[in-house]
Amino acid sequence: MKIRRCAVVFLEPREDVAFELESLLAGGDGLRRDRRWLALAPHIGEEVELDAAERELLGRLSPGQWIEAGSLDADLAPALPRLLAEGLAVADGDDATQAGWRQRDARLREVHWHPLGATLHAFTRWEGVDAVQNSKDSRAETAVEMRQVLGAPPVEAATRAEDDARVALPRIAPNDFDRLLARRATCRNFDPARLLPFEAFARVMQRVFAAQAEVRVSDDTVFLKKNVPSGGGLHPMECYLVVQHVEGVAPGLYHYHATDHALEPLPFRATDAAGGSEDGIDGRDGDEAIAAEPAALRRFVMDMVAQQHWFADAHVVVLLSPRFDRTFWKYRQHAKGYRVVALEGGHLSQTLYLSATEAGLGAFITGAINEKQIERAFGLDPVSQGALAICGFGWRGPVMETAELDPAGEVWAPAAS
Ligand SMILES: Cc1cc2nc3c(=O)[nH]c(=O)nc-3n(C[C@H](O)[C@H](O)[C@H](O)COP(=O)(O)O)c2cc1C
């Protein structure tokens, strides 16, 4: 059997600190501190605790050169089975588990991730997180509570020169564009009873996500022009949708086709959405019913946005899902690659906010998302295609039940809030 190390792995010396009464009673600080070594390998996506022998063997194996397992030193050989079982070492041969790890490791190599970017992305994904409960538990939900619990934040506008050294700029009278910008506010109050007209939906999609033109270099190499900038002009961001309340569109999951300006229906399986399915991406069945039961769909949206109920009734929920392999095709193992992709989410989000605002709609973005449930439901392999952020848009409701930031009263009349 030939073996080698997986392509990317970082080791973290982790300390866990927990309250311990015995320590307090014995005159200590009341804390128990446990230290261990964790292997973080992005193709695995779960931490693997290692003992000293496993750590040593991992350091001896080459990620590039295959060697005979039998050639390992006798003192290190006993550590091999565990590294193989966990996917930190990979082997040739027909064994199904080994073939699975080999395939995942190979996929990571093919996508040309920068090792740190891959590791950051893989280990900051959530599953089953309730951000609302976490915020309640922190007892720092409102701005006033935050000040009490966290102390004062860094100053709101940084200063680098004395008042009299500043070059004052004229305040220019607002025009229509300024008025549009002023009406943009993150919407946390959607009106699910009011259907979004098909045309309004189509217009927002066209402005934000559609290809506006293209440059065809050859049959297999095409660059798109969109209404947002993109690193290398590669436009890696795919748009997946949960359509909930749009006239003429069956509630359900969709992929948006950027050059055809069309919706591609995807199956919705409540088990995937709830995180209860063991089926991987390959276990999806194309014949499944497309139509989704609205209550189950809403529960899935709640899971997507980590239980932020103020987003759950958005008419259209948008997953910003980068195809890392497209950007990293050019920016191979590039130190800025992941950052560039993340920045693109901001460009799309702001364009979505402004397009929605112009249409009289509200929009939002959240980074507090349960990526793992999202990946399962949409059939995304996180090594090549991730879940970066969730946006959404639709009609605002008549009453502000969850706070929106509208200090100038541009969006809400005083009575409504
Ligand atoms: C990247 C990003 C992530 C955000 N995540 C959340 C979120 O998880 N929940 C939420 O209610 N708002 C979220 N927001 C919205 C901000 O809270 C909001 O932009 C901010 O309070 C300023 O309000 P405004 O957008 O109305 O000007 C996010 C905004 C950005 C840019």
Image (cartoon, helix red, strand yellow):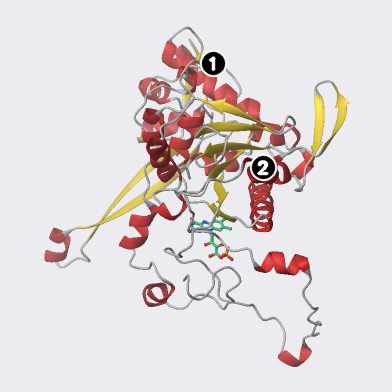
Q: CA distance from mark 2 to mark 1?
A: 61 Å
Report the side of 382 relative to 29 (left or right): right
**Which of the two labelled residues, at mark 2 and mark 1, occupies the earlier sequence position?**
1
Q: Residue 368, percent across and down?
A: 47, 51
Q: Residue 53, percent across and down?
A: 37, 31
Please give the name of the residue rendered at 35% of the width and 35% of the height, measured from the top-left corner: 51
Residue ID for mark 2: 199
Please give the name of the residue rendered at 44% of the width and 73% of the height, measured from the top-left corner: 143
Q: Residue 357, percent across and down?
A: 65, 58
Seen as rendered, the residue at the extreme bottom is 164
Type of the residue with mark 2: Glu
> Label for residue 67?
1
Choose between 98 and 254: the one closer to the eye: 254
Q: Splitting the image into four quadrants, where does ligand 1 fall?
A: bottom right
Type of the residue with mark 1: Ile
Q: Assess mark 2: CB under 8 A from ligand 1?
A: no
The answer to whether marks 2 and 1 mark residues whose Cβ atoms lie closer than 8 Å is no
- Answer few, some or many: residues within 10 Å of disc 1's Cα (few below 14, many 20 plus, some between 14 and 19): some
Element type at mark 1: strand
Q: Residue 148, percent across and down?
A: 37, 77
Is 230 above or below relative to 66?
below
Is 120 above or below relative to 351?
above
Choose between 360 and 216: the one closer to the eye: 360
